[in-house]
Amino acid sequence: MSTTTTELDERTTAAEAAAPAWRAASAGTRAAWLRAAADALDAHADELVPLADAETHLGETRLRGEVARTSGQLRLFAGVVEEGAYLEAIVDDADAAATPPRPELRRMLTGVGPVAVFSASNFPFAFSVAGGDTASALAAGNPVIVKAHSGHVHLSRRTAEIVATALVDAGAPIGSLGLVEGREAGEALVRHPSIQAVGFTGSVSGGRALFDLAAGRPDPIPFYGELGSVNPVVLTAGAVAARSPALAEGLVGSFTLGVGQFCTKPGVVFVPRATGFAELVASRVAGAAGGRLLTDRITEAFPEGLAHLEADPSVTLVARGGGGGADAATPTVLATDAAAVAARPDTLLEECFGPVTLLVHYDGPEDLLAALRAVPGSLTATLHSEAGEEVTEVVAVLERRAGRLLFAGWPTGVAVTWSQHHGGPWPATTSLHTSVGATAIRRFLRPVVFQDAPAHLLPEVLRDEALAAIPHRRNGILRIPALRR
Amino acid sequence: MSTTTTELDERTTAAEAAAPAWRAASAGTRAAWLRAAADALDAHADELVPLADAETHLGETRLRGEVARTSGQLRLFAGVVEEGAYLEAIVDDADAAATPPRPELRRMLTGVGPVAVFSASNFPFAFSVAGGDTASALAAGNPVIVKAHSGHVHLSRRTAEIVATALVDAGAPIGSLGLVEGREAGEALVRHPSIQAVGFTGSVSGGRALFDLAAGRPDPIPFYGELGSVNPVVLTAGAVAARSPALAEGLVGSFTLGVGQFCTKPGVVFVPRATGFAELVASRVAGAAGGRLLTDRITEAFPEGLAHLEADPSVTLVARGGGGGADAATPTVLATDAAAVAARPDTLLEECFGPVTLLVHYDGPEDLLAALRAVPGSLTATLHSEAGEEVTEVVAVLERRAGRLLFAGWPTGVAVTWSQHHGGPWPATTSLHTSVGATAIRRFLRPVVFQDAPAHLLPEVLRDEALAAIPHRRNGILRIPALRR
């Protein structure tokens, strides 16, 4: 059931009307609204988790954990708002003796206005109606209109009802959180003059189309998209020699987790040739059960993606798993070599959503580095090496290709913390920002500076008394409230 | 003389080769390089100022001041780099007891890679080869390739020689600063795979074309453009009643400064009807001499822009100045009313570069607010009011339309400080960032996070000892080195 043009206008009008109250809300008020949304999610978990499972087949354990992560994200941003550093308040006092004389300037960040959020298929809570994009946009002081993912529409509607009601009950204005459905309504949302920024998680093709719409507006708006990522993993000779069984176990666990539908799934693994590692992986995959994929479209695309890879003359089948039922996607491991990857990166290094990974055999440092330089921008890059091995150049190359570098770990699992960065060069993301972690709030803020303003016309937070209570910079010096040091 | 494709490839190859050294340079080293560039500019002022005057007609006094501003910008960014807060270092220590267990994460910002800078006609130093975009891009750790403005090519070549030599003499790599000439080379630069971001100052049409190129790349890159701005000024009845002569004097001084070629020129002034203010302005403009505009194109466009405004049936001529020579642009004041502005903002509120301003007569608060809501995004908005007048709503509307709000001042003159924001909603700028002030550096940085990295594989600044010497956040708590508190 698509949202009509009239309904879309109602949503955007309501969001516009709600925007001033969100921007003007004090830190304490806005934080309370975010916590009310978090509490409502937790309180309705027993109702929402079965709805989500019926539409996504992700299972109760995973989905309960995801609800907790989602309410946790909302609470993290409540804390970010209360702490106040996100405002980046900077004051320079007037200096009549300067050449030329310097006026007083007081800068802060403020909400951009209504934000559109496109939710993801693979995280029905954490990257959906009340997920990280919504939490960070609300925290920044903006109403949100979510485009529901077609893979979990019923869950999206119910989540939106619950969260919107909780916000209004907590005192937030009507129009704080809206929902639209259908591809056309989503496109119209990106083009709508009321919308000032877009958050998106999804495919490269879908994200590119919406990015182009956002950039092509008469007044272009920022489009923060998280699209596709192959998440390269590098195993050194030393690591393979020292702990092959654990590496094979870790890899199989990571690329099959959530039926291979994490954006941080390790999709390509660089392995020294002729170490027996592929055989170890094969022995573990043989016993790995598959699972049902999220949507019909993903179910159709998975064998097509496999066929696309297997059509390359360099690609061989290492192993296929088994079991999981008639409609299960089968865990699959393929192999190629570094020279082929360096020659045909567009074919061999395209993201394939689902439980598949590609082993890339390499013959030495130069062979490895040439292939790594062909890896497209990714969310993560992982290195398994041993102390004493020379890996400086590998790290330097990986650091240019990914936003998160992992050492001796696996990329699935993204901690929601102050420091997290979930982003990387195109096509991993469309921007230099993150969609996970405290700094995700920066995407939905714009700077404004007040020159020689009378105190009563300043936003309250920029007046001397309020300013002293938050981290800020004054005349070049960073200051932190004494109680928080 | 246009840069050839071969020459462009040489420049980008050199910039790519220089990038690792810029990124890896310690704060002290990078700051020293920036100061060497600043010192070289100052040392060559006697040579550069006459070159600039011959090409821009801006006069020695203004140009000497601009050299000082430009070297001052470079030194400001040296200080920003040394202080280290711009790195936004954030560390979360591992927590094995968390659910799920949390890895160690260390985040920082790092240079995006080679940056293209398109210099402006109206600031041959401060927004040109070694101007603010270049200074902030270098400070962020990126080589720069400047597209010279056709209005001051000889100055651009000589400035590039002087600064590039100074950088290399100070130990920076060859390829730190390159120069290209010609429109085609500029377009090729934006499309070039080596270029990772663009800074631009210029017209709406030119900026839009390059923005579209940047967004249309197979791998889109951020385009930070400062395009066009009408910089609305609001005079309340109280302000006009209290100090008309000073306001008229200030306005004429501001809109004719630099022959009306500042991006912050007050282009539209909202004045209560029938207060005699227009007559006061007219009496001052009659004695105002014009001046020669920067380029042939601007000289041709100015009368066209005036004719475009005067063709509107609501527009009347208030006054024209005189003198300044045969090739001088004549200071001109036009008038219309708020209803016409609200009805035809596209016609009446288009930026007209040169010494012209449009008085907009209004009849009361509603009439004023309706017109203000039609004002396009601007770099600045200015309010002149008296204590006791109710202006809250006016301030709220202006705050949504501009990046800098001034009170009882004039928008020309942009202090280069930590707090400055020089940006605004489209078409003032293409992004939510600033091109002036310390935070301009943020445009040319990308986040990267290291998960569970051995200390020796971390960038030096993220290791515990170095981290303690800069402002950073650890486990959610902001920390400032003791010596700097």
Image (spheres, coloured by chain):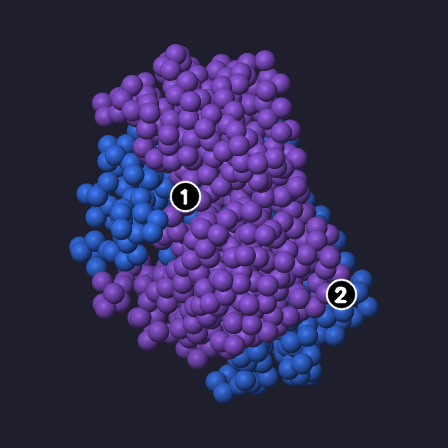
Chain colours: A blue, B purple
B245 over A485 or under it: above or below? above
Q: Nearer the viewer, residue A289 or A153?
A: A153
Residue A151: quarter of image: top right
Disc 1 element: loop
Q: Which of A372 and B272 is in front in this view?
A: B272
For label 2, count other residues whose C-alpha is less than 10 Å away and answer few (under 14), some (14-19) or many (20+). Answer: few
Name the residue: 47% across, 73% down. Answer: B25
Give the residue type at disc 1.
Gly
User: In this view of the protein, can residue B464 be seen by the observer?
Assistant: yes
Name the residue: 24% across, 45% down. Answer: A467
Q: Mark 2 lies on which chain?
A: B
Where's residue B424, x and y in %?
A: 47, 39
User: In this view of the protein, can residue B133 be seen by the observer?
Assistant: no
Name the residue: 31% across, 47% down. Answer: A101
Reading the image, the residue beneath label 1 is: B413
Disc on the earlier residue, 2 or 1: 2
Q: Nearer the viewer, residue B273 or B463?
A: B273
Residue B6's label in the rendered image is: 2
Q: Nearer the viewer, residue B147 or A327?
A: B147
Residue A85's label in the rendered image is: none
Q: Judge from the rendering whether residue B398 lies leftward or rightward of residue A170; answer left or right.
A: right
Disc 2 element: helix
Q: Judge from the rendering whether residue B64 lies leftward or rightward of residue A244; answer left or right.
A: left
Give the residue type at disc 2.
Thr
